[in-house]
Structure formats: structure tokens, C-alpha cells
Amino acid sequence: MLTLKQKRSLQSLLVGCAAWLIAGLIFFPIFWMVLTSFKTELAAFATPPQFIFTPTLENYLHINDRSDYFSYAWNSVLISFAATALCMLVAVPAAYSMAFFETKRTKGTLLWMLSTKMLPPVGVLMPIYLICKSLGMLDSRLALIVIYTLINLPIVIWMVYTYFKDIPVDILEAARLDGATTLQEISRVLLPIARGGLASTMLLSLILCWNEAFWSLNLTSSAAAPLTALVASYSSPEGLFWAKLSAVSTLACAPILILGWISQKQLVRGLSFGAVK
Amino acid sequence: MTTSALDTSPPATQTKSRKRGLKIGWFLVSPSVLLLLLWMVVPLAMTLYFSTIRYNLLYPDEESFVGLENFEYFLTDPGFMPGALNTLTLVGSVLLISVVFGVLISALLEACEFWGRGIVRVMLISPFFIMPTVSALLWKNLIFHPVSGILAAVWKFFGAQPVDWLAQHPLFSIIMIVSWQWLPFAILLLMTAMQSLDQEQKEAARLEGAGPIAIFWHLTLPHLARPIAVVVMIETIFLLSIFAEIFTTTSGGPGFESTNLAYLIYNQALLQFDVGMASAGGLIAVVIANIAALVLIRLIGKSLTDKQ
């Protein structure tokens, strides 16, 4: 007969083993991708797959050989950051007024904003494509920046809104009674308090922009193409470059993966529109 | 919450500052509302217009009003029925997989303390942060490849004939790839939700003699109803327009076996340049998404705003 303590530690051992097994299975593709990025092309294609091999940095050192990696990466950075900044600029005032000056229409407005996310992108693919074409904005970073701002706006407003909702309205009232103007009230009182929430909102927006792969594939070809499009170009059947693909993929995903790991708790809130905290 | 806090302040300042606030309020919300309205109305109106004319970018001079002809062509297109069915199968299967396994895996993680729980958590949610084109090609080349893929090696190890997954079971393979991306999302949300479950309640139930299954069924699951609803809603939004995963792996084939509506419309639009028909298809996709959205917002919208 086991004592209660022994029973507990046995349970912990069993649960631990099961959890590690599942996590290992789910994480394996990523692990395998990183491993493959250190192989030669020949070793990457070997059968059976090699777990032990002489690692090489060749794929990383020659990352620019097949295509200009850095110009794609630069596009990704520029587009994600610009879209995020623009989105915050529009969203923060809206969230502020909805969180602190609630009217009968506020909830309806919020739900309506959420509903714009339900518009499938294919439904507006043709018009957006033709508008961009006639404005000469096919394969332009500006077009993607504007589109990313718009598609992330509802999520960003919701997320900022839920953070603002947690701030007691009395603090703002007090500032107002002390004669602060609205601008001062926002910049000196509200923004410093909500700094953490705003930071995780920006992070979520960056992640969504970085990984977006419908508009980037359809509206860009080379000059403005971000990393999602560069990776997609490896799907062409002419020649298999698995090791190079893995190196490019690893570099493309690493920053977002690390950001995601750091901020997982805060992201839940934005991803669930404030419903799960 | 807002109103009750305001009620405690003196009535005179309340109305004054509230009035100022309301005026500023609309001024501050209007850019967002306007932008989103433009983003919805202009392209949708254009789609509506295009869908009623014959408009092919390859024959630019033949534009003419054709009524509902584009809809007729799209609905009778050999790709439409398989596309619609595949969309339903894809959304349904991925939702089922991510909710069922999401609940089970997060329940396992929260069952008790064990060695390395933080690392396990990070490993489990990682696929969600991988960009769609990377996960698609990663699975296509390194996992599914019939000669050098990992699965081929496993099959050979057990003496079975390796399977060419993307050629023989294209839709199943795509469901696997997409589930791999979205199951972590469910785990992430449900795990966080479970942490807010009242531990005392659980302990009390245990002392009353409730087994772990009874606790899971009567305490944990009801607590998860709301987060599960959120997972279903958000995943549906994204799953209805899965595109990059199909684009980079099977291109919808063989035949229409892995074509969903999003890919079918893309195919009409940017490969065959048939703007009219693609727009008709786009509108049909919008209608389908709206039916789904209406049902979901009814179900979930209330609970989303209730606790704010």
C-alpha cells in the first residue's frame, strides 16, 4: 500500500512523462528544422534521416546566395513595425474613449469591430488587388503596411480596451479635476500606467504582421516581399534546398518564437479579445 | 464598472467632465470606425459590382453586365462542391482536434507539478508562432516527404511501405499541418484559463471523495466553457480562410482534393484572371463566413462582453 506522499510523487512522475512525450512530439518538427539547418544539402536529404552528423554553418554563412535574405528580412521588419505603430496611433485614442466614456453604443461598436475580422480576405482580394494595381502599389511596402494596420486594428483596439478597463477611472478623474487637459491626462497619467499592456499589444501586432501570409503572397513579388514570401519561394520544385530552406526558416521564425515565449501570458489576453486573462 | 465609479463623484463635475468626455469620445473613436468602414464597404461594393459583369483581365475590352451569370458559373464550377466540402472538413476537423486535445493536454499539464513544466509549456505552444509558409514547407519536405521524410523512416522501421502523404492523402495532410499550428493556440488559452480555476473548490471536491474524472467533468469543463467558445470563434475566423498552407504544399491538388474555397477563388482570380467569377466566389465566401459569424457571435458575443 502506498502512502499519500508516495502516491503523489508517482502521479507527478507519470504525468511528467506523458507531458514530456507529448511536448516532444509537438515540438519535434521545429527541433528537426533547426537541426537540418546545420546539415549539408546532401545530409539533409539522406535516407534514413541523420540525427548524428558533422554540423556546418555553411547555410547560414551563405544565406544570401540563393536570394537576398537581408532585403526580405528588412521588408518584414519595416512593414511589421510601421503597421504596428500606425495601428497603435489609431487604436489607443479609440480604446481610451470607449473604455472611459462608455455610451450605449460602445458595446455594439466593439462587437462590430470584431465582426470586421470575420470578413474573409478572399472576399476582397480582387478589389484590393485592382486598387493597388491602379495606384501602382503592387509589390509596395506601403500597401502592405496599410492593409496590416487595417486587419489588426480590431484586435489591437480590443486588447488595449481591456487593459484600459482595468485602470480605475478615479485616477483619471483626479487628474482632470486638477486641471489636466485631455492630452495631458492621456500622456502623463494613462499611458505610463498602461505601459505593460500597450507593450504586449504591440508585441501581438508585430507577431501577427510578421506571420501574415495571404496578402504578402498575393500582393508582393520581390521588391516589397517579406520573409513569408521568401520562404514560399522555396516551394518551387526546381531543385530541393532543404538545408538552406531550414536555415532561412530558422532565422525567419526565431525572433517571433522568442518574443512569443517571453510574452505568452500577456498574449492570451489579446488573442482571446480579453475573454481569457 | 465605469458608471458605478462615476456615480460616487459629485454630480456637477460628473456631468461636466462626462459631457466633455463624450464629445472627445466620438472624435477619438471616429478614425477607427471610419477606417474599418472604408475597409469593409469600398472593397465589398467593388466585389459586388465586379460579380455582375463579365470582367477578365486577359480580355479587358469585353466588360458587360451579365447579371447572375458569374454566380451560376462559380456554383456549377467542378471545383465548387469539393471546395466547399473541403472547407467544412478542414475547419471542422481542426476545431475538433484542437478543442479535444487542447482540453486534455492542458488538463494534464495542470493536473500536478512535475519536473520541467515551464519548458514543456513553451515547447507545446511554439508551433503557433511559426509562420504559415514555414510550417507548410517544413512538414512537406522534412516530415511528409515519401523518401527522406521522418514519417517515411518511421514507416520503414516498422517494415511498412512509406506513404506519399501529400499526394495520397492531401486533405488529411493539410489538416495535420493546420492542426499542428492551431492546437497550440487552444492549449495556450485553455491552460491559462485553467490556472484561474479555484483550487480550494477542487480541494473541497477531492475531500468530499470526488475522483479526478468527476472533478474534471463537473468542475473543470464547466469552467472552460467560455475559453472553449473563444477558441472556437477565433479559430473559425482564421480556418475559413486558410491559404498559405495549401498554396505552398499541394496547390489544391491533386484535382480538387485539397482545394478550399479561399484557394479556389485565388485560382480564379490571380491564375485565370477572371475577376467577375472570382468576385462572385468571394461574395459567396463572405456569405458563408457571415453565417458562421452570426451563429458564433450570438453564442459567444454575449459572454464576451458580459464580464467586462
Image: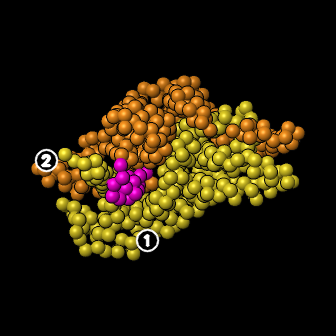
Chain colours: A yellow, B orange
Can residue B82 be seen?
A: yes
> Which quarter of the picture shows residue A97?
top right
Residue at left 41%, top 46%? B187
Residue at left 41%, top 38%? B204
Q: In this view, does A83 lie to the left or right of B224?
A: right
- Chain where mark 1 sits: A
Q: Give the range drawn in magenta.
A: B112-128
Vertical position of residue A182 compared to residue B16: above or below: below
Q: Is residue B165 left or right of residue B85?
A: left
- Chain where mark 2 sits: B
Q: Mark 1 points at which residue?
A: A64
Residue at left 55%, top 27%? B298
Dots 2 and 1: beta carbons under 8 Å?
A: no
Residue B114 falls inside the magenta stretch: yes
Residue B210 coordinates in the image, percent (x, y) = 34, 34
- The kind of residue on which mark 2 rests is Ala
- The kind of residue on which mark 1 rests is Asn
Residue A103 coordinates in the image, percent (x, y) = 74, 35
Q: Which mark is residue B160?
A: 2
Residue B48 coordinates in the image, percent (x, y) = 60, 31
Q: In this view, does B56 lie to the left or right of A153?
A: left
Kindly state the secondary structure of the residue where label 1 is placed: loop
Q: Please rate how many residues cluster around mark 2, counting C-alpha atoms within 10 Å: few if below 14, some from 14 to 19, many from 20.
A: few
Between residues B112 and B207, which one lies in front from this camera angle? B207
Residue at left 31%, top 40%? B172
Residue B71 coordinates in the image, percent (x, y) = 51, 27
